[in-house]
Structure formats: C-alpha cells, structure tokens
C-alpha cells in the first residue's frame, strides 16, 4: 500500500478522479504563480465550475465496494465480470481506511470463493486483493489470519505461473512486519515452501521468494538461522549461474546470499569445496567487468568474495 511518501512537503498522489482534480488545481496554481508565496486569484466562474465538478465526482466508497461484492456473490455473474469487480475493489482498498471498511461491511466473504475459483483471472485478482489488504495494515493482516487464508495461499504456490507468483506476493504482504502471521506461516512449513520456490523455473516466483527470504532474514536473525539449517545456502548457491549480462535472477540470488552470510555458519557453508562458490563469483566479476547495468551484481560478488574467501576466512573451493 502506498504510504504517501515520507516528505511532508510532497503533495499526496491522487487515487481517484476527485483527488486528481484537486491535484491538478494545486499544480496549476503552483505553475501559474509569479513568485514563491504569491498565488494568483482564481477566476470566480472557474472556481465555481471546478467546485461543481468536484461534487459530481464524489464517490461513496463503501457503496461502490458493496456493489462490486454483489456482482461477485451473484451465481449468474460471468467470470470476466467477477475479475473486473475485484479490480474495482482493489482500486479502493489501496487506501488503508477503505481496506478496513471493506472488512467491516463483510467484504472478506468473497476471498475464499475467489481463491478457489476455477478461473485464473479471478484467482489471480483475489490474490492481488489479499496483498493490497494486508500490505502495511496490521488490522487486515490479523483479520486475514483469523479467516484462515494462509493455508490456501500456500497451496496456490503450486498453481500455474501467474497465480503462483501472486500467491507468494500475498504471503509476503501477510507475514512481513506482522509476527502472528509469520509464526503461523512457519508452523505450516512456510520456510521450506520459500526454499522450494527459489529453485522453480518460474522467474517471478523465484524473485519474489528470494525477496521474502531476504526480508525475513534481515528482520529476524532466528529466521535466518533456521533457513541456514534448512540448507538455504546450498540451495541459493546452486541457483547462481554466472552471466555476461544483467540477470535479475542472479542479482536476487547474490543479494539473498549476502544477507545469509551475516551469519558465520553461512560463511562456513559457503566455503565448502563442492559448491564452487569462489569460482562462480570470480566468473561473475570477469564477465561483468565495466558493465554499468551489472553494478549491483558486481558489488554483491565482491562483498561475498571478501566475506567468505579472504585470508581470515580461508576459502577452500580451489
């Protein structure tokens, strides 16, 4: 969910037509100003026109959400119309207050049927909705946990590509910065699920899984140590394939390994001769030398070489 930015002087970005019109008025006034602090007087007819336009654009968010819910709950509704109704709801619940209102009007009743739909677009849309509701919103994270949504999200990691990657995104939004959801996810074997997903052929799923692993390892040292016990180092290193061009999968793997090697045990595992990590890192540096688009890959590779294979640590894979 967008936070509106950290700079209090930065105008909040518009989320609907009414907001867009207000934003345009403010921007126009700023552009027309002859000097700082001197705003020109708006013509009275123009002001009246804009005020009337704003009134006609005012939307009852709860009413619009309830209308979309009726569409979703009607057995006669076509699947394409259901997917469109979910998109309408997502547009509103990007706002945290609207997301909480969505729960209050009974909106969560549509989530499980959507996740179980035979239609790919409806399943994917519902997963996007779960992600929007949960992101940076502890209230909705708690309600989704109580609605027992997590087990179905885990099942959908085995679904076809677009569904699986959205399922991982929804899981990420539910468990990050909310320990009750994270604990429930771990109890159902969630860390093992993440490790399985980083070895899949689904590129988006691999990247989202690695991102979640890195985030959890950074936030919780205990989770990082548990990943290491589950052979995360070996699995991540196995996925590293030197490339002579920018490769998002490679960059993500190197980033994840950099987080894991904050632990001495991970460093020790990286030095295992059978992994050939040192030679992989040296190949990455050689293949990408001087390529601006590969700077982060180069930085991660250099960090890992120094961290795992300096004289102090005694690399052993040569």
Image (spheres, rainbow, N blue to C red):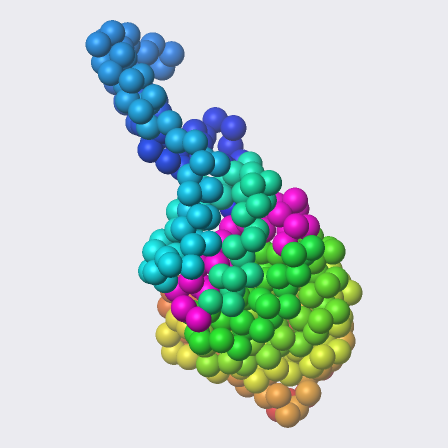
Residue at 66% from the left image edge and 61% from the top image edge: 148
How many callouts does the rendering have?
0
The residue at the point 53 percent across, 77 percent down is: 158
Image quadrant holding the C terminus, namely bottom right
Please say if 8 is above or below 203.
above
Residue 122 place in picture, x, y as percent: 42, 62
On whether residue 142 falls in the magenta region, the answer is: yes
Q: 90 or 240, which is in the foreground?
A: 90
| Residue 294 in sight here | yes
**Pick the front one: 168 or 80:** 80
Which residue is pictured at 44% across the width and 76% down the height? 160
**Magenta-colored span:** 118-144
Residue 300 % position (x, y): 55, 68
Tell me: 314 left or right of 301.
right
Residue 306 is one of the magenta-drawn residues: no
| Image spot of residue 181 (x, y percent) | 69, 58
Whether residue 313 appears in this view of the structure is no
Q: Is residue 260 left or right of residue 157?
A: right
172 over 187 or under it: above or below: above
Q: Main secondary structure of the magenta part?
A: helix
**Quadrant of the rendered image containing residue 121:** bottom left
> In percent of the image, x 69 and y 55: which residue is there?
146
Q: What percent of the width, then of the height, locates residue 99?
A: 54, 42
* Depicted 84 relative to depicted 243: above or below: above
Q: Quadrant of residue 97?
A: top right
């Amino acid at each position: 969910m967008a936070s509106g930015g950290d700079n209090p002087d930065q105008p909040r970005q518009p989320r609907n037509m009414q907001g867009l019109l207000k934003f345009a008025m403010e921007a126009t006034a700023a552009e027309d100003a002859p000097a700082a602090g001197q705003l020109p007087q708006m013509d009275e007819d123009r002001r009246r026109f804009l005020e009337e336009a704003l009134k006609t654009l005012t939307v009852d968010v709860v009413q619009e959400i309830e209308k979309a819910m009726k569409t979703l709950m009607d057995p006669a509704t076509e699947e394409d119309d259901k997917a469109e109704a979910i998109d309408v709801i997502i547009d509103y619940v990007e706002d945290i207050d609207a997301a909480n209102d969505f729960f209050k009007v009974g909106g969560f009743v549509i989530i499980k049927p959507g996740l179980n739909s035979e239609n790919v677009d409806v399943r994917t849309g519902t997963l996007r909705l779960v992600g929007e509701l949960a992101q940076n919103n502890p209230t909705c994270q708690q309600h989704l946990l109580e609605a027992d949504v997590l087990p179905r999200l885990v099942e959908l990691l085995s679904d076809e590509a677009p569904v699986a990657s959205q399922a991982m995104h929804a899981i990420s939004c539910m468990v990050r910065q909310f320990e009750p959801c994270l604990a429930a996810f771990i109890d159902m074997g969630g860390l093992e699920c993440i490790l399985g997903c980083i070895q899949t052929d689904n590129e988006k799923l691999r990247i989202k899984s690695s991102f979640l692993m890195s985030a959890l390892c950074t936030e919780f040292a205990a989770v990082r140590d548990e990943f290491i016990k589950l052979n995360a180092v070996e699995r991540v290193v196995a996925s590293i394939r030197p490339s002579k061009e920018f490769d998002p999968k490679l960059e993500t793997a190197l980033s994840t390994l950099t987080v894991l090697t904050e632990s001495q045990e991970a460093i020790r595992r990286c030095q295992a001769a059978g992994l050939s990590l040192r030679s992989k890192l040296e190949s990455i540096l050689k293949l990408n030398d001087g390529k601006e688009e590969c700077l982060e890959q180069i930085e991660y590779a250099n960090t890992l070489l120094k961290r795992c294979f300096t004289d102090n640590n005694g690399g052993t894979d040569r």
